[in-house]
Image (tube, rainbow, N blue to C red):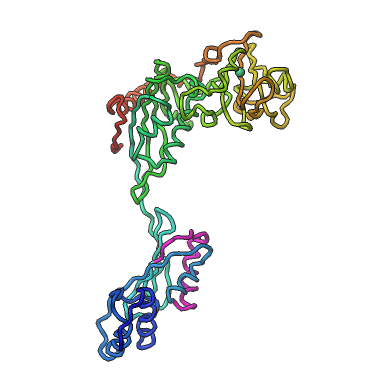
Amino acid sequence: MTPRRRPPGRLRATTYLVVGGAAAVAAYLTPEPPAPTRPVAEALVASPRVEEAPMAPVWRSRVDTLARGETLVSLLRRAGVSADHASRAAQEAGDLDLRRLRAGLTVTTSGMSTDTVPQEIAFQPAVDRVVKLRYLEGAWKAIEERLAWTTDTVAARGVIASSLYETLHTALGGTLPAAKRSELVWKLADLFEYRVDMSRDLQRGDSVGLLLERRVAPDGTAREARILAAALTVDGKPVEAIRFGTRGGVADFYDATGKSLKAAFLRAPLEFRRVSSAFGMRRHPILGILKAHRGTDYAASSGTPVRAIGEGTVIKAGWAGGYGNVLEIRHRNGYVSRYGHLRGFAKNVRPGRSVVIGQTVAFVGSTGLSTAPHLHFEVLVGGRQQDPRVALRDKSGWPIAPREKGAFTALRQRLLAQIDARGAGAPSLASAED
Ligand SMILES: [Zn+2]
């Protein structure tokens, strides 16, 4: 016989058939991978000899990947498990609420080479979950193992060169997946949204320090990170956020003096992540020409939600010349916030209606004297326009109760020391057990 070369896959299939038909060798297991160059003819000749003098049984495993839309039963059938055993095994797994197994899941079927039914079917439906279906004394039994998550803390520091976004991405590199790093930048901005307008106030040379608590999956990847403390300098001045759980209350963030970071006004009418300059500090080129009127311009795409900076009552929602569609909200203490060039207003936002802080009240547009989508924002106090940076610099958050002040101060010092332990400036970081 002339040996013919075949791709390994074909050879495997052929060998499979011969072995299965020749003896009671497990059909659900892939035989030991044959040498790629081994000719089919040889395999055909070799099989009867196996029957005559069977080799000692060996443990064998076969790995299959769940295809899109495939069920565990059909995968097991594909792996050579009989219909009866496949459905019985899958039924056991069904009790573990595994209805939504993801495509790409690998399923390992193992047993002795002489078995007609596999002894174990194993898969990992989640990063912290291993399921083993065992065939013992004629019955299938599911065993579930939970793998432990761990927690650690990570400190990072950086000096802002082009943007907060870039600085934190660099400073946190390696400690978190990229998507989580981005999320953290936005979380940080949200944390300070009553104190700092990240898109306006941060200057080149300002610094950011962070202490994070990470949840690390059993496979070693960090999946979650929450901020324990943040220390910024904004335009050269220190601003802190310390996470502190008061007795009987939920954890919240407090500044260096022990006052809640929350205040009566948000510092910006757009979420930081929605502002074009969030990714860099360069001014929007088109907006330079709009500086004629007093206010603050935020470049953002048309349709971006505009938030009420504080609780109040709508006093105007309509057209006003150069402002285009404009919204005005009256707040306490003679404050009025004004939002111009709007594409439109949110549902039910009209004069006389009350709004709450952070509520979506309108959408960014380019109506009136505007050449590109942006939000024109003004704060008026006693009827006069004021710099929002001054007018909204409200630090009147609720203070921590005096009896808890000592615990807060101790925690603050401990957390900040961990940030300080990182070298200043350089994007250095380290992981340390808590
Ligand atoms: Zn403007």
Magenta includes 160?
Answer: no
For the C terminus, give its image quadrant: top left
Q: Nearer the viewer, residue 226 or 91?
A: 226
Image vertical order of residue 221 relative to residue 9, above or below: above
The total number of labels drawn is 0
In this view of the protein, can residue 358 be seen by the observer?
yes
Image vertical order of residue 302 relative to residue 136, above or below: above
Q: Image quadrant of residue 302?
A: top right
Q: Nearer the viewer, residue 354 or 179?
A: 179
Q: Position of residue 137 (x, y in %)?
A: 38, 77
* Residue found 33% across the figure and 77% down from its top: 31
Image vertical order of residue 416 relative to residue 120, above or below: above
Q: Position of residue 85 (x, y in %)?
A: 46, 76
Q: Nearer the viewer, residue 60 or 169?
A: 169
Q: Position of residue 325 (x, y in %)?
A: 70, 23
**Horizontal side of residue 174 vs 394, given as left or right:** left
Magenta includes 102?
Answer: yes
* Residue found 41% across the figure and 32% down from its top: 227
Q: Nearer the viewer, residue 68 or 287?
A: 287
Q: Position of residue 103 (x, y in %)?
A: 48, 60
For the N terminus, give its image quadrant: bottom left
In this view of the protein, can residue 137 be seen by the observer?
no
Q: Image quadrant of residue 188?
A: top left
Query: Which residue range is magenta in the image?
Result: 81-107
Q: Quadrant of ligand 1?
A: top right
Image vertical order of residue 288 relative to residue 179, above or below: above
